Image: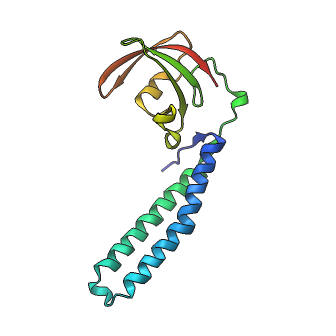
Amino acid sequence: MASTINYYTPEGLQKLKDDLQDLKVRGRAKAAEDLREARDKGDLSENAEYDAAKDAQGLLELKISKLEEVVGNARVLDETNMDFSKVLIMSKVKLKNLKNNTVLDYTLVAEEEADLAAGKISVKSPIGKGLLGKSAGDMAEITVPAGKLQFEILEISR
């Protein structure tokens, strides 16, 4: 299976690396401690707590492995060479919802950096996908779970 390369801000990539380090150090230490405590409770063949601790350790290692793959395939975006006349990852986009005339500001980011409260939406979200490649002044009709939305792209910046 081919690995997918994703692009991140320097801050977003650093957060992924910090999360990975935390899982490797604190997560593994906690899993080992949980196993020690469960092992001390007697016969391992009938120890549900030990089985649960082993399962949790396996899930932790799977999470670490997946995050290592994400970090290994991550690339930092060089915004200086990007064309911001069209909506791309890392674009800041000012939109007007044509149904209710609400003006929205979003920054398109990698899926792991998405935070709607901070105005960061994933390029893989329906709205993110619908905006990619559009220019200021373009209209975008985007299908979301609640139906179709129409936006006018007012401004693109970085």
Depth check: 158 or 131 in front?
158
In the image, taking residue 71 as reference, residue 150 lies left or right, namely left
* Relative to 89, residue 133 above or below: above
Location of residue 36 in the rendering, given as x and y in whole percent from the top left corner: 44, 83
In the image, taking residue 113 as reference, residue 130 lies left or right, namely left
Kindly identify the residue that appears in the image at 42 percent across and 77 percent down.
34
Location of residue 76 in the rendering, given as x and y in whole percent from the top left corner: 66, 41
Q: Residue furthest left?
A: 46
Depth check: 96 or 13 in front?
96
Q: Quadrant of the C terminus?
A: top right
Q: Residue furthest bottom?
A: 42
Q: Residue furthest top?
A: 137
Kindly identify the residue that appears in the image at 51 percent across and 44 percent down.
112
Kindly identify the residue that appears in the image at 41 percent across and 82 percent down.
37
Location of residue 32 in the rendering, given as x and y in whole percent from the top left corner: 48, 77
Kindly identify the residue that appears in the image at 52 percent across and 73 percent down.
29
Location of residue 16 in the rendering, given as x and y in whole percent from the top left corner: 57, 51
Q: How is the image coloured?
A: rainbow
* Relative to 14, residue 89 above or below: above
* Relative to 30, residue 62 above or below: above
* Relative to 116, residue 64 above or below: below
Q: How many marks?
A: 0
